[in-house]
Each structure stands twice: as structure tokens, then as C-alpha cells.
Image: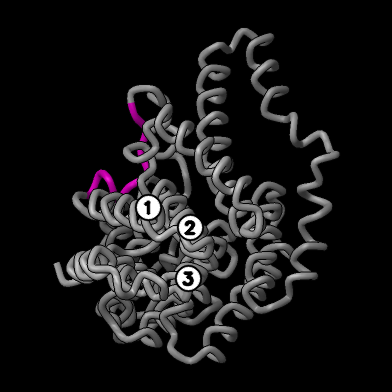
Amino acid sequence: MEMLNFSENIISLRRRKGITQEELADFVGVTKASVSKWETKQSLPDILMLPRLAAFFDVSVDELLGYQPQLSREQIQKIYRDLAADFGKVPFEEAMEKSRVMVKKYYSCYPFLFQICVLWLNHFMLAEDPKRQREILEEASNLCDHILSDCKDVGLCNDAVILKAVFDMQCGKAREAAETLEEILSPYRLWAQSDAVLIQSYQMAGEMEKAKNFSQISIFLHLISLVNSASQDLTLCIDQPKRCEETIHRIDCVSEAFDLEHLHPNIAAGFEYQAAIVFCMQGKTREALERLESYKELVRYLLRGEEQFKLHGDSYFDALDAWIERLDLGSEAPRDRKVVCDSLSETLHHPAFAILEQEEEFQRIKKAMEGFREG
């Protein structure tokens, strides 16, 4: 009961109704001293008295107790930000336990539970023991199962299916993850054309503003998906140097055309990093160092200020900011800045970079990246 606000609510509701403690006591059949104890958190009413009190104040029992089984988008954003910050400043298990308390408190608020799954996905690697990491992933997967079992929101359930597949993959259950996603993401299904159908529907209905806004959002999401998929393609085709070079060249052109380094520096940095790995594995140290230099500068830009660290639009994607603000987490980054900074230097420990260890330029880049964490 310590998570409820019964005492404060009774005081507020009584004053709003303009009655004394004695008048409230007379109505529900208790002493004035009992009401006084409720309001000073010395005791709580009998559970059978709660419906009578709720009826008197014309509120639900949940409202009377101050229990909020459902959170608003703004409340979810704030709790996520606070919990993400905890992972950067308190011991890992303490942050985990705090998030678990919130799960129990809002176990029927499925959008919130989904974001807790996202939170755990973004921070499970902070647990030092690999066994503990797996336990957290399995716990998150079970939370996805709870969403799928009881939530009636089809869209949220589809998101939970995809997130559960990510957890399965992280736990080494790649085949299970693939089987889960094959049916949903099959390129032979009509979902691949759904964006165009919705845009045309808006247009035919005369809702031109909706059509324009959704068209812009669609372009943005497909742009991000293209770059991410290209990064994956580089890892798959590492033994095909010509194809890798062509992929890198084409994504460079796309990135320049859409000014990706300013629009979404995190995605741009990820591609530069993957390109550096490819060049290292092909023995092309000069090209690898150039990509790592770009990666370092993108990270520097990303960490330079709050705006770069948040998701945002630009002069071309001018309808994006309104859409971003409607996302469950808004424009906030999924991980706290300190957590990101602490993990930066680790990115240059990839085995592929071993051939660069004797290069002065590589050591300079490493030192700069460590400086980002210290700064």
C-alpha cells in the first residue's frame, strides 16, 4: 500500500466536497479519529468500506486509492527516462530491482511493460555475468509473453512478437526467432505494400495533410531500414569485396543525399563502424582508418548536445518532429548518455581492428573515444 496515495486523496476529495472529517466519519459510520488516522497515514479503512467511500466521492476505487493501472504516454516517457538514468548512476542490480517494482505496480499497463522490455534490452549487457545477462533476457521474453497473452492491442502485440524474437536471438535461439518472424515479415505478403495503400486511401478521402505526413514518415523509416539492412548485408557478404565496396558506395550516396550524419548520426555512425570492420577484414587499413575517423566524429557530434542525442527531423523531414513526439518514448534516446559513453571505448576492441593496433592514427582515435567517456 505504500505505492498508493490514499491519504492524500482522501484529504483532497474531502476538501473538494467541502466537508469536515466528522461529517465524513458520520456518513461511513466510523469515528472522527479514524478519518484523522487515514489522512495522517496511521491506518487504512477496512477493504469493505472502500466502495462506500468511492460512491460518496463519486470516484472509482482505483481513483480513491490513487492506483493508476494505466499510464499516459507522458508518464511512460518520464519513468523510462528516470530508470534509464538509474542504469548509468547506481549499481546494476539496484536499477533492475527498481524497474521490477514498476512492472509489478503497472502489470496491466501493456504499453509500459513493452517499454520496460525495451529498457532491459538496452541495458542487459551491463550485467557482468553472461549467465545473469541471459536471465534478464529470458525475464524480458516472459514479459513479452504476458503482453501477447492478455493485451488486446493488435499493433502492440505485433511489436511484442518482434521484440520477443530479438530476445530469443540474443539467447541463442536463432531458429525460433526466425520461425517467429518469417510469417509476419514475409516479403510475399501484402504488408510490404501497406504504406502506399494507406497514403492512397488518405488521398482519395481528401485528407491530404495526413497523406503528406505519412508519406514523409514512410520515407524516413524506409531510409533508416535501408541503412540498417545495408550494414547487415556487409556482414553477410564479407567474402565478396566488390559487392561490399558497391554497397558502401551506394549508402554513401544515400547518406549524402539525405544528410544522414545530421538527421540521424547514430545510424550513420553504425554504418561507418561496420564499413571499417569490412575494410579491416579485407586488409585495407587506410580505408578502415578513414571510416573509423568518420565514426569517431559522428559520435563526437552525437554527444555534443541534447538535440543531436535525440531523434529529430530536419528541413526536408519537416513533419517528423510532430510524429516523434507521439512515439511512446518521444524523442528521448533509449539509453542514458552516461551509459552510452561508458560503452564507447569497447567498440574499438573488435577483433577485426587488431591489424590497426600499430597504427598511430588508430591509437589517436582510441584515445579520443576514451576522452568522450571521461568528458
Q: Quick check: is 312 in the magenta stretch? A: yes
Label 2 element class: helix
Mark-to-mark CA distance, 2 and 1: 9 Å
User: x, y (%) of residue 255?
Assistant: 43, 35
Q: Which mark is residue 363?
A: none
Figure disc tally = 3
Name the residue that disc number 1 marks: 291
Name the residue that disc number 3 marks: 352
User: x, y (%) of residue 300?
Assistant: 23, 54
User: x, y (%) of residue 328?
Assistant: 47, 49
Tell me which corner region of the image, top left, top right, bottom left or bottom right, holds residue 197: top right
What amino acid is found at the position of numbered circle 1 in the picture?
Answer: Arg
Contact check, label 3 and label 1, Cβ < 8 Å: no
Label 3 element class: helix
Q: Earlier in the sequence, mark 3 or mark 1?
A: 1
Contact check, label 2 and label 1, Cβ < 8 Å: yes
Give the extent of the magenta segment: 306-314
Along the line of sight, which residue is nearer the eye, 105 or 288?
288
User: x, y (%) of residue 146?
Assistant: 68, 69
Horizontal side of residue 331 vs 183, given as left or right: left
